[in-house]
Image (cartoon, rainbow, N blue to C red):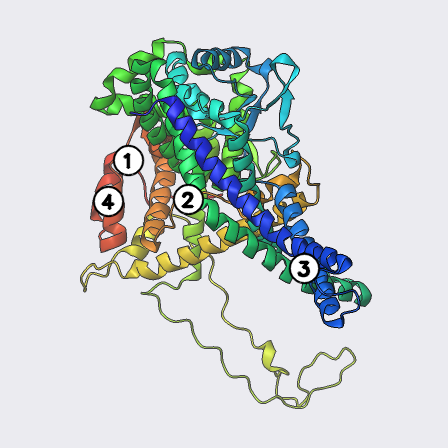
Amino acid sequence: MAGPEEGAQAARARALAVLRIRGAALAVALLPAAAAVVLLVGGATGRIGGSHDEGWTAVRWAVVAGAVVVLLLAAAVAAVVVRARPALSPTVPIAEETAPDLYRLVRDLAERLEVPAPSAVALTPDCDSWLEDRTHRAHGGRRRTAGAGGGRAPVAPVLVIGSPFLWWMRVGELRALLAPVVAGTGPSVHPDIAAARRFVRGLDAAVAVAARGAHERPGPRRGAPVAAVAALGRAVRRPALAFLGWIARLLLRGCRDHAAEMERAVAAAASERAQAVDYGLRIVAQEQVGLAYAGWDRLLTRVALPAWRMGRWPSRLDAGVVSALTELSRRDRLAEGFTSRLSERPACDLLEEPGLIDEATSLLAARLFHGGPSEPGPDWSPVDWGAYPEEVVDRKWRLEAARLHRVLDEQPHPGAEPAPARPEPAEPGPVASGPEGSGLAGNGEGPGLAGVGDVPGPAAPEPAAPTLARVMDRLTAAPDRAPTGELGEEVAARLSVELAREEALHRAEARARGRAGGGAGEGPGSGGGDLWIDGCAPLFPPQPPRTGRELLADHVTAMVCCAAIDTAGAAPGLDWLDGPALLVGGRRRADLAYPVLSLVEDGDAEPLRAWLGEVGVRAEKPVRLV
């Protein structure tokens, strides 16, 4: 197996291949200029045509003009590649004053690995860790810093750590997990590898600039002269950006394979260098990575997502993942030994104020996975785990129950008689022009109707009481036909439309927030750097779209839970792995799925009636809605 030095040498060779492609592109751009210089010098010395030879004079000036155009285009492309803002992972920066023990652990690890220490530490709400170069001018970074001997050394990259690791892993496991990541700082500070990475990131950013310019929408309406100038600017800018994107993609295709092999060689060299550091703990830490990922995924999709959809964001997600993984360890026999680890020192003790950092990463997770605002507000407030059942679970159930009854109110009952038709109005007679213009017929035959629109129709029926019995009656199949559940098809379709309308409204609000934040500026830390989060949120939808049947089952379940809370003394609860839970007598009832599915899919309400009788729920009593 190749050692770390062999891997580093392979990475440098691939980096040089990427830089050769950059040099070849520069040579192609300078080739017309070189030809123009040769022709001009040859004409001045008389070796290539003469100064009075009209044919050679035309050729010389044509080549000079072409060289100038090529140099201008190359300079424009190079300026965009150099100045374009590379993609920056959204993270929570950790200052050294807020986590001195964590910085000390990272520096000790880098010293043991004989590599430069990372320049800073940041957290991400994900189960992953990596090194990220933030030396670009747009990010406010520096490419070089003072080194030993008075020289200038490249700045080391930033170490990004997954926040669930800090709360679930022990200190020794975190050190073992970060060893191969920190070992990657050695090749990262090599000048050739750093230059190759900057070139590839610049090309990628230039492609993004060209793509954004191609899809740029016109601004607000202005005066005719301003609109004409703006239209002319777009007409010139779009072909220029298309040319820029073509050049950048061409160069990316040329260096793609070399860049990929360079990164593989860097990773292999870092892994080999980290073999001698806590090798036994690395095996245990890798097992914890898979467990942490499973718990984090369940926590986001089952617990955090319902709160996000209601405008609340759990402020202690990382602490919640510990509870979720502890519950998973209790249920899973394969994870029985993991609970004994809780007696060891957790890695979050390396932070001075873990609660504040947990809150910041929780807010960032809501932005990434749901598209929430970047700051708390009246419609986007945090919620603690202690208040989660009352403020999220209970409100979620009552909102879904209200939506279900609203859909039922809009849909006529299949067994109800049709409403009587409006009577046709009589022919209007002569209208008396009384002193007050009453509009009554003045023919002495009694009061008549003067207009078609004045015919009083049947009074609108009052909305039915929101009871569980009403829902069961509407979804139960008729006695004279097989219970196929066809009666719930239209209800499920209407629920899907209603929910899609609410989701579209949420996306429009998210886009409006992104446009409002985009005008704040383009500096580091301003809204301009986060448009790719707030402009098209969410980046990573945590749950696939649900079918109409699934939505109907969720709404019926919510109605049953509301009835149980209001009439049987049940209470909303929180299950760390399954999300909202119904507590009856202080214990979770997890046997509601089959009776609800029987009603929704087969139109059979008997299993649900038996369940309600066992719990003591009175289906005929109205429930409180939101």
Per the image, label 2 sits on a secondary structure element best described as helix
Per the image, label 1 sits on a secondary structure element best described as loop
Mark 1 surroundings within 10 Å by alpha-carbon count, few (fewer than 14), some (14 through 19), many (20 or more):
some
The answer to whether residue 215 of the structure is visible from this angle is no
What residue is at 33 percent from the left and 34 percent from the top? 578
Q: Earlier in the sequence, mark 4 or mark 1?
A: 4
Task: Give the mark toward the camera: 4 or 1.
Answer: 4
- Residue for badge 3: 237
* Three-letter amino acid code of the residue under disc 3: Arg
The quarter of the displayed image where residue 68 is located = bottom right
- Residue for badge 4: 595
The picture places residue 94, in percent across and down from the top left corner, at 56, 21
What residue is at 38 percent from the left and 39 percent from the top? 562
- CA gap between label 3 and label 1 equals 70 Å
Residue 616 is labelled as 1
- Residue for badge 2: 257
Mark 2 surroundings within 10 Å by alpha-carbon count, few (fewer than 14), some (14 through 19), many (20 or more):
few
The picture places residue 503, in percent across and down from the top left corner, at 49, 51
- CA gap between label 2 and label 3 equals 31 Å
- CA gap between label 4 and label 2 equals 56 Å
* Three-letter amino acid code of the residue under disc 2: Asp
Mark 3 surroundings within 10 Å by alpha-carbon count, few (fewer than 14), some (14 through 19), many (20 or more):
some
Task: Give the mark toward the camera: 3 or 1.
Answer: 3
Per the image, label 4 sits on a secondary structure element best described as helix
* Three-letter amino acid code of the residue under disc 4: Pro
Task: Give the mark toward the camera: 4 or 2.
Answer: 2
What residue is at 49 percent from the left and 64 percent from the top? 460
Task: Give the mark toward the camera: 1 or 2.
Answer: 2
Mark 4 surroundings within 10 Å by alpha-carbon count, few (fewer than 14), some (14 through 19), many (20 or more):
some
Q: Earlier in the sequence, mark 4 or mark 2?
A: 2
> Which one is in front, 199 or 403?
199
